[in-house]
Amino acid sequence: MAMAGLYRRLLPCPPAVDFASTEGKQLFLESIQNGTMEGFYRLISYFQTQSEPAYCGLASLSMVLNALAIDPGRKWKGPWRWFDESMLDCCEPLEKVKARGISFGKLVCLAHCAGAKVEAFHADRSNIGEFRKYVMKCSTSDDCHVISSYHRAALKQTGTGHFSPIGGYHAEKDMALILDVARFKYPPHWVSLKVLWEGMSYIDETTGRPRGFMLISRPHRDPGMLYTLSCKHESWISIAKFLMDDIPLLLKAEDVKDIQKVLSVIVTSLPSNFREFIKWIAEIRRREDGSPSLSPEEKARLAIKEEVLKQVQETGLFKHVASFLSNSCCGQSPTSVNGESLPDIAASVCCQGAEILGGKLSSSAVYCCQKACMKCLNAEGNNPVRMVCATVANGNNEQGVDVLIPSPPGRPCCTFSGPSKYIGMHPASSDVLTVLLLSLPSATWDGIRDEQLLREVNGLVSTENLPTLLQEEVLHLRRQLHLLKRCQENKVL
């Protein structure tokens, strides 16, 4: 009886050597003896099969992130924090990836967003000797891993562009072990570095650039705790250009005489969809995960967020930003929350959280928030924990979702009612704008003609004297901004 579909593919040998073959086993044993399989053990512990035909990049990255023991900082399912393909959507909507895959540059962006340290190399900006050096480096330790982006045709395999991690290296034969995440198609296999390099030199038709490889390792610090930049929305290219190119030109063209005028030039020119670019990192949990009390880990993360927020609001720049926004036309600006209250923001976040926790992100499932309320939990110390508790529904199914709200120590625990419902709450326009201005490159302000004002502005935006936590937050956003600028210029994509 004829059956539809395909059951695996025969691995073309040569140029590949099946990992499970007699020759493949011998290469494996010799590589172990020579110490070039150290990275293999971590990777094989988290080896996974891509869940969609076009998810090779996402599967490779989630596999490497888990092998490096990078904490995603949010739950996957139940109480467990774990990287899964469904969670890697900050740089490209999953529906787009599912339809046409992901580019080399967007995967680099995803790795950065996930909290990894990434060094990326296109084949035309590197050479086989440098590639061999990094393969050797990651094969002799478990501190880093290499993901290769190559065209299957060079390996005489069916298909086109593909991502997979490199699991080991045989120095004498100059062969790499590819842990192919399309396990439904090809098993792990050895291939010569020369052939693999040829595959990485193929041009990616979607970007017009050669493919390449990326070196992924653990960062020396955690990623941003309060905010992150996102290229998920299509407007990110114009916003990145505005921040990096247009603001310096605006300040140079305008004869600004004081800080308020500097802020006015920037804020009144911000793109209307600016809020899609800088995102609030929310702490979300299922209510069924346990009692209303917080775990020690949740308390620790919230305490760090609150300390960073406190440090933001203690800067001199924040005082100028808060004054400007309060004196501007009813506080309205592209960053304002007044048109969208904290309950509205929290309701939206709760719905997104329900999708993530339910593993249905970017699917046809639609969650709506039926009710939301603010609660304050007593915690050790003087600062109560603020939590938005919401009930979201998808058809006949209801789910309780909580969002933890950081706020500076010493602020009263307020509710959604009353005229002061926004006081001390997060996210807020003044916090967002302050952090973003601190994150701009130092050369942004060089066009200010008034020397005294230039010295004052440089003093306000300097990162040198910032407290450590805030400095790390700002520098993280600055690195993201530089990366997105390179993407916008097609230097990474």
Image (cartoon, helix red, strand yellow):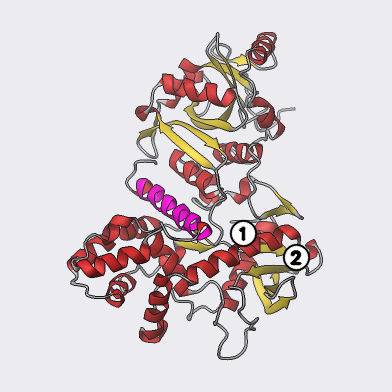
- Residue located 59% across and 17% down the image: 190
Please provide percent x and percent y for residue 14. Answer: 55, 11
Residue wearing tag 2? 294
Q: Residue 251 location, x and y as percent? A: 23, 66
Quadrant in which the C terminus appears: top left
Count residues near mark 2 (Cα–Cα under 10 Å), then give few for <14, some for 14-19, many for 20+.
some
Which residue in the protein does label 1 denote? 364
Residue 261 left/right relative to 87:
left
Residue 484 is covered by the magenta coloring: yes
Give the SS element for disc 1. loop
Q: Position of residue 51 (x, y in %)?
A: 65, 41
| Horizontal side of residue 364 vs 463, given as left or right | right
Residue ID at (35%, 30%): 125
- In the visual, does 489 lie left or right of 87? left
Nearest the eye: 55 or 307: 307
Q: CA distance from mark 2 to mark 1?
A: 32 Å
